[in-house]
Image (cartoon, grey):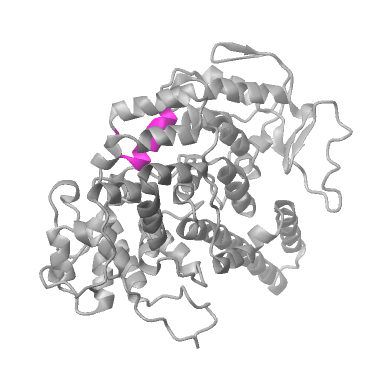
């Protein structure tokens, strides 16, 4: 349990994370050369539009104004990364190697383990396989965190994280870790601000989703309802939307034959050409008509004639045009961005936009970001661990490229929200209450200290202990004075005044209620 705490009235009542010994001194001196402060409303809006402020986002906002800034973010034209970060990401196997190549390499390692003689050889091949699996998962997680911290379009980066959580997959199941980065970068990212129907279809055809929710095993005469159920309950319509178990069963029949292409070295494009007409292939996704149930189906009161792959497209269109889908997705977005219990009027307006634009995600977000409720909720929305970590990195290092992303993954593991780490398909919780317990706050204080003190390995590899540790990062910067310092609570100012060193000052700021709420 953490020690006694700073308490702030209102939204932070009852939370405990800073020691009582931190309460009460004079703040450290600040430079006389400070940037022009943003208004309270500007800060409130900008903190929701991205994973926390940095100098670049503040400068762009001051130059463009809110309306043009939102236009540019929703246009999603800036996926640029600092060259050093792009080089780091492009060096990972999960980015450099095509998914089919990763799957083949993994299958070959599994075969080597199976064929190894009992004893030392078996143990050595087992260890090699485990290390390979661990390395690929680490890379999956690092790629997404590096994009979140350094991505040029911060609203898009938040939406990539949101959709990865909404359409959650678990890396440790089967071969999911081998295709998790492909899932994020080629199924989620291109559609994060596009049409919801296109996004749903991209996730449906992704090997990661097909593997995780077992639709690769869903075939005529041996149906598997796992994916059909979660597609309706978790991805589109929500619980209690009026669909029945029969609808789930009918959707499962529609999805029969949708799976993953079998791996054949040297013959990546040869599967299925000699099968019956109607075979479809898109990357590793295949629709095999030989495995499909061609009976007519009735879904949500509509008849879908048995025709093959076209049934899937018809079903997805039917589901995503249901009013319940517009309502469910809009509420999830509002819960993530606005409040744990978002105002019904905001959700209704977003759902109306969803229906009028045929599920245009950018248009729905514009409705939400133009709503006064977004600013009115400032300081009441508690950051989840990913939002906390990414915003802390953006403020502390302000665009400075790191060389080792492994600590980022370790910190998120400690705080209980590892990327691709949710075992169940419902994704991590969106509400603050799930992340504000005493154990979580103790972990956040530890992470804040690791980031704020500079005592971490972000700028050195694990096998390069000779590299001197960097200096303590400076958080008392023009960025801090423009976007954070003017709006700190008295309790946080008092706590900062207790700091005995720059490292402590950084730690207290990053673990304060003001920083953990946005």
Question: Where 118 sits versus 238, above or below?
Answer: below
What percent of the width, then of the height, locates residue 508? 24, 68
**Residue at the far right in the pictured view:** 274
Q: Quadrant of residue 224?
A: top right
- How many numbered discs, if any? 0
Of 427 and 328, nearer the camera is 328
**Residue at the far left in the pictured view:** 24
Q: Is residue 480 left or right of residue 315?
A: left
What percent of the width, then of the height, locates residue 513? 22, 57
At 19% across and 79% down in the image, what residue appears? 500
Magenta stretch: dominant secondary structure: helix
Question: Where 211 sits versus 153, above or below?
Answer: above
The verdict on residue 332 being magenta is: yes
Q: Is residue 476 left or right of residue 20?
A: right
The verdict on residue 118 being magenta is: no
Report the magenta residues as a range: 327-342
Question: Where 312 sits versus 438, above or below?
Answer: above
Question: Where 298 sits versus 132, above or below?
Answer: above
What percent of the width, then of the height, locates residue 86? 58, 63
What percent of the width, then of the height, locates residue 205? 65, 37
Whether residue 326 can be seen here: yes
At 50% across and 68% down in the image, what residue appears? 406
Q: Indicate the quadrant containing the N terminus: top left, top right, bottom left or bottom right.
A: bottom left
**Residue at the far bottom in the pictured view:** 466
Of 105 and 445, nearer the camera is 445
**Residue at the far front in the pictured view:** 63
């Amino acid at each position: 349990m953490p020690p006694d705490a700073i308490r702030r009235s209102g939204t932070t009542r009852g939370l405990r994370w800073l020691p009582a010994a931190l309460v009460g001194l004079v703040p450290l001196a600040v430079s006389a050369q400070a940037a022009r402060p943003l208004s309270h409303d500007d800060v409130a809006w900008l903190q929701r539009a991205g994973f926390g402020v940095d100098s670049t986002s503040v400068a762009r906002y001051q130059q463009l104004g809110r309306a043009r800034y939102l236009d540019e973010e929703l246009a999603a034209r800036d996926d640029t990364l600092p060259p050093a970060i792009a080089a780091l990401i492009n060096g990972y196997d999960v980015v450099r190697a095509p998914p089919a190549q990763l799957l083949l390499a993994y299958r070959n390692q599994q075969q080597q383990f199976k064929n190894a003689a009992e004893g030392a050889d078996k143990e050595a091949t087992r260890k090699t396989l485990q290390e390979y699996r661990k390395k690929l998962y680490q890379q999956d997680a690092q790629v997404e965190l590096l994009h979140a911290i350094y991505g040029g379009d911060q609203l898009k980066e938040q939406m990539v994280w949101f959709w990865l959580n909404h359409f959650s997959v678990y890396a440790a199941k089967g071969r999911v870790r081998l295709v998790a980065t492909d899932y994020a970068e080629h199924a989620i990212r291109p559609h994060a601000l596009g049409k919801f129907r296109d996004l749903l279809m991209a996730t449906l055809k992704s090997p990661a989703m097909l593997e995780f929710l077992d639709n690769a095993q869903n075939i005529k005469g041996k149906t598997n309802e796992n994916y059909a159920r979660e597609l309706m309950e978790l991805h589109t319509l929500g619980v209690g939307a009026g669909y029945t178990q029969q609808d789930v069963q009918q959707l499962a029949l529609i999805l029969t034959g949708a799976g993953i292409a079998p791996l054949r070295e040297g013959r990546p494009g040869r599967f299925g050409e000699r099968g019956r007409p109607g075979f479809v292939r898109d990357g590793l996704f295949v629709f095999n008509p030989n495995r499909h149930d061609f009976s007519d189906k009735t879904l949500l009161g509509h008849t879908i004639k048995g025709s093959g792959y076209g049934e899937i497209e018809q079903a997805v269109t039917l589901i995503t045009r249901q009013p319940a889908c517009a309502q469910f997705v809009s509420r999830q977005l509002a819960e993530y961005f606005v409040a744990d219990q978002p105002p019904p009027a905001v959700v209704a307006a977003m759902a109306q936009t969803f229906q009028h634009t045929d599920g245009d995600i950018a248009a729905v977000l514009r409705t939400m970001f133009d709503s006064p409720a977004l600013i009115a909720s400032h300081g009441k929305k508690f950051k989840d661990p990913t939002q906390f970590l990414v915003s802390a990195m953006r403020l502390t290092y302000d665009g400075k490229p790191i060389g080792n992303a492994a600590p980022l993954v370790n910190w998120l593991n400690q705080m209980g929200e590892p990327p691709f780490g949710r075992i169940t398909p419902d994704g991590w919780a969106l509400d603050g209450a799930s992340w504000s317990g005493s154990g979580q706050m103790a972990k956040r204080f530890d992470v804040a200290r690791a980031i704020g003190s500079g005592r971490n390995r972000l700028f050195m590899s694990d096998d390069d202990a000779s590299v001197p540790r960097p200096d303590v990062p400076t958080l008392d910067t023009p960025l801090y004075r423009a976007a954070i310092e003017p709006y700190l609570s008295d309790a946080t100012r008092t706590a900062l005044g207790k700091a005995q060193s720059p490292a402590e000052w950084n730690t207290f700021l990053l673990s304060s209620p003001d920083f953990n709420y946005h």
